[in-house]
């Protein structure tokens, strides 16, 4: 008797789905009505979420019973698809300010002396305003007069600010403010620290700790080094008073996001550098990342763990065009592991063509026990004690002077899992490329396996009424391909295609050495790079969208504009402001949200009922802006009917 999948007992189906990827489960449920019913069953959805994306926002909402697990699966799938396909659900102007931070779905923006806090991910909240003047006056008697405020970090309802007043001596304070709902203004100040130096000042915080760093130490070799200071914000998490700052010795680099990255994750403070020595060695083979971490409650040098042998690349892989390098630390939505994500544009193997590739690399630290369960993906030699390994049979070894500090490790295979080339296998038919000056924002999102460029396109809106270039998303993504390709799969195998699943080769599972982390060397399908929105003359909806994405700037912005933006797994938030003198604090600009999550940003933009958000935001923007401030993805025919406008 023929057996169809939908007749299988539930337990068997449960087992089958346990070994599928998230996307496959959803795809399977879309194949027929019966499977759709079965796979939408609560236990299966719970299992899908808890197995594949237990650390996502949707998982947390489902755990807190704010949405069902079914909704969580649906929402996760939709927003990842929307992101990967460059097809957002909405775009809106959500505020106005001279600077902003965006994290955990919260937008904090500053305008004059007030901070505006808006929960973008919660559809029902209205923006709140916190007045800074009384808070600052309680710290510095001169208050806000002639002072400059910058936003440093936001997390867990704590906002860290830098107050600087160019007096003699300079008044420089780090101030932490609670943004909690219902906190009386008098209790908003959580910490104040007078700063001796604000050189390259940065801050990271949690609800309990505020960490900040300055590039103000001097190492024994005379180079500047980072000094990291920790402050506890509540009584339960104490850092002993008088704890001196922790100087990160021999930790090289000072450019945030290019050569260094700092992050707090899972109770630890992490610092990452793309370099392991201050000096450039004349003879050198291998580049390693240098990563250190310490527990938040113990910022002491004896609690510091270091790994300066995390394999990065061989210099022989080719030169890098440094202008395009970005480096960040991102948490993996499924494992919660912290991952190094670096994008590099390289002349591979000394060729004449520059290609951009997004590399990911796990971080491992040597444990103090001798039986180190070393991660497959980290470098084999761990820890500084590994000694000066040198390549065998290399004529340059003989030339090394005794003071040379050459680095070498055997080449490691570049598994496709950890290597995402911008163009995938489409190198012969590449999408339009943009020069760096036109690429206003670059990001890579691990959870969507997608890169995002926010570009200024001068070919898109070339109509006489608005000759200026317009902003567009340029997104490229990839997905795991089926383990066994079907014959209709016309895409050529990407990359080297070691051993597995290549074309019509017999399926033999030779075990490669060393075995890569997941599912042998996985093969990916690369979606074509997509630009969004469509040209303004495509339809009235597109024209309206362009109006939102490229809002008019205040008069007098003849000197071009600057763009600052933040991307997370479900949205892109950016602020445009006239490129004018830095000190001119009041020249703010509009803040725009592009959302890939259907569920975010409803009420406060005035779609359902009167969000007071819109009124307060748009009051200064004028009524024309108010009417045009929001676009929601409609049905395909909406454009034809003009009903989207
Ligand atoms: C680290 O990054 C910077 C900036 O991109 C670059 O100049 C430098 O060469 C990099 N270091 C190494 C070892 O590649
Ligand atoms: C490793 O060190 C930590 C503290 O530094 C200690 O708590 C732990 O027991 C040690 N583990 C082993 C296996 O020695
Ligand atoms: C590196 O990239 C920048 C920005 O695209 C470009 O201006 C520069 O010419 C490139 N460098 C080289 C050596 O090609
Ligand atoms: C990418 O997605 C993760 C969730 O996995 C999110 O936390 C992060 O902010 C995003 N980062 C970027 C640069 O897009």
Image (cartoon, rainbow, N blue to C red):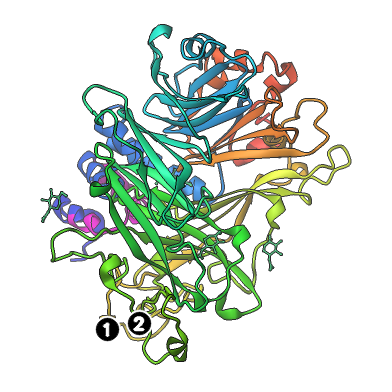
In which quadrant of the rendered image does the N terminus lie? bottom left
Q: How crowded is mark 2: few (under 14 residues within 10 Å), some or many (20 or more)?
A: some
Q: Circle 2 — which element?
A: loop
Residue 636, horizontal then vertical, whole percent = 61, 41
Query: Which residue is pictured at 75% across the width and 29% down the height?
Result: 553
Marks 2 and 1: in contact by CB < 8 Å? yes
- Say which mark, if any, is on residue 499: 2
Q: Is residue 440 magenta?
A: no
The mark total stands at: 2
Relative depth, front residue between 133 and 62? 133
Q: How crowded is mark 1: few (under 14 residues within 10 Å), some or many (20 or more)?
A: few
Relative depth, front residue between 540 and 105? 105
Residue with the mark numbered 1: 510
Residue 342, horizontal then vertical, whole percent = 48, 58
The answer to whether residue 320 is above or below residue 327 is: below
Residue 121, horizontal then vertical, whole percent = 44, 29
Which portion, as a residue range, is magenta? 15-41
- Secondary structure character of the magenta stretch overall: helix
């Amino acid at each position: 008797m023929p057996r169809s999948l939908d007749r299988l007992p539930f337990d068997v189906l449960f087992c089958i789905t346990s070994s599928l990827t998230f996307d496959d489960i959803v795809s399977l449920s879309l194949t027929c009505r019966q499977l759709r019913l079965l796979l939408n069953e609560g236990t299966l959805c719970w299992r899908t979420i808890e197995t594949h994306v237990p650390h996502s926002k949707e998982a947390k909402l489902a755990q807190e019973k704010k949405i069902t697990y079914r909704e969580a699966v649906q929402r996760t799938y939709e927003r990842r698809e929307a992101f990967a396909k460059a097809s957002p659900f909405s775009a809106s102007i959500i505020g106005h300010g001279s600077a902003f931070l965006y994290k955990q779905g919260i937008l904090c923006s500053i305008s004059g002396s007030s901070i505006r806090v808006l929960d973008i991910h919660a559809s029902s909240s209205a923006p709140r305003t916190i007045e800074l003047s009384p808070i600052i006056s309680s710290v510095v008697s001169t208050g806000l007069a002639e002072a400059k405020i910058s936003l440093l970090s936001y997390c867990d309802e704590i906002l860290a600010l830098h107050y600087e007043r160019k007096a003699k001596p300079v008044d420089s304070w780090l101030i932490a403010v609670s943004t909690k709902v219902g906190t009386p203004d008098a209790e908003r100040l959580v910490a104040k620290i007078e700063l001796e130096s604000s050189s390259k000042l940065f801050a990271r915080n949690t609800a309990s700790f505020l960490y900040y760093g300055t590039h103000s130490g001097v190492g024994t070799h005379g180079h500047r080094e980072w000094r990291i200071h920790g402050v506890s914000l509540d009584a339960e998490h104490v850092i002993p008073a008088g704890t001196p700052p922790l100087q990160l010795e021999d930790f090289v680099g000072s450019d945030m996001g290019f050569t260094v990255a700092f992050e707090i994750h899972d109770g630890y403070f992490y610092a990452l550098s793309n370099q392991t020595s201050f000096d450039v060695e004349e003879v050198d083979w291998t580049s390693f990342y240098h990563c250190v971490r310490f527990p938040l409650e113990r910022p002491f040098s004896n609690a510091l763990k270091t790994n300066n042998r995390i394999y990065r690349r061989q210099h022989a892989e080719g030169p890098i065009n440094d202008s395009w390098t970005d480096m960040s630390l991102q948490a993996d939505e499924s494992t919660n592991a912290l991952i190094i994500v670096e994008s590099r544009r390289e002349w591979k193997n000394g060729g004449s063509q520059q290609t951009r590739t997004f590399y990911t690399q796990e971080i491992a630290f040597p444990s103090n026990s001798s039986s180190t369960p070393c991660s497959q993906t980290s470098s084999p030699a761990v820890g500084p004690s590994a000694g000066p390994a040198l390549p065998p049979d290399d004529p340059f070894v003989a030339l090394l002077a005794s003071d040379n500090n050459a680095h070498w490790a055997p080449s490691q295979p570049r598994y496709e899992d950890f290597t995402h080339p911008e163009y995938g296998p489409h190198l012969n038919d590449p999408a339009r490329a943009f020069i760096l000056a036109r690429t206003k924002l670059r990001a890579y999102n691990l959870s969507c396996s997608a890169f995002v460029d926010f570009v200024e396109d001068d070919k898109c809106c070339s109509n006489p009424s608005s000759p200026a270039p317009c902003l567009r998303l340029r997104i490229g993504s990839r997905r795991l391909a089926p383990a066994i390709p079907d014959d209709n799969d016309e895409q050529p195998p990407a990359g080297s295609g070691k051993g597995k699943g290549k074309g019509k080769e017999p399926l033999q599972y030779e075990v490669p050495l060393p075995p890569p982390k997941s599912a042998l060397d996985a093969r990916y399908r690369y979606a074509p790079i997509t630009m969004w929105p469509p040209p303004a003359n495509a339809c009235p909806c597109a024209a309206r969208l362009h109006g939102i994405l490229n809002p008019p700037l205040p008069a007098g912005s003849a000197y071009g504009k600057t763009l600052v933006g933040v991307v997370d797994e479900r949205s892109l938030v950016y602020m445009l402001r006239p490129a004018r003198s830095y000190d001119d604090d009041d020249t703010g600009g509009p803040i725009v949200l592009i959302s890939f999550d259907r569920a975010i940003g409803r009420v406060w933009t005035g779609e359902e009922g009167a969000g007071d958000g819109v009124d307060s935001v748009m009051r200064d923007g004028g009524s024309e802006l108010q009417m045009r401030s929001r676009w929601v993805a409609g049905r395909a025919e909406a454009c034809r009917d003009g009903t989207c406008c």
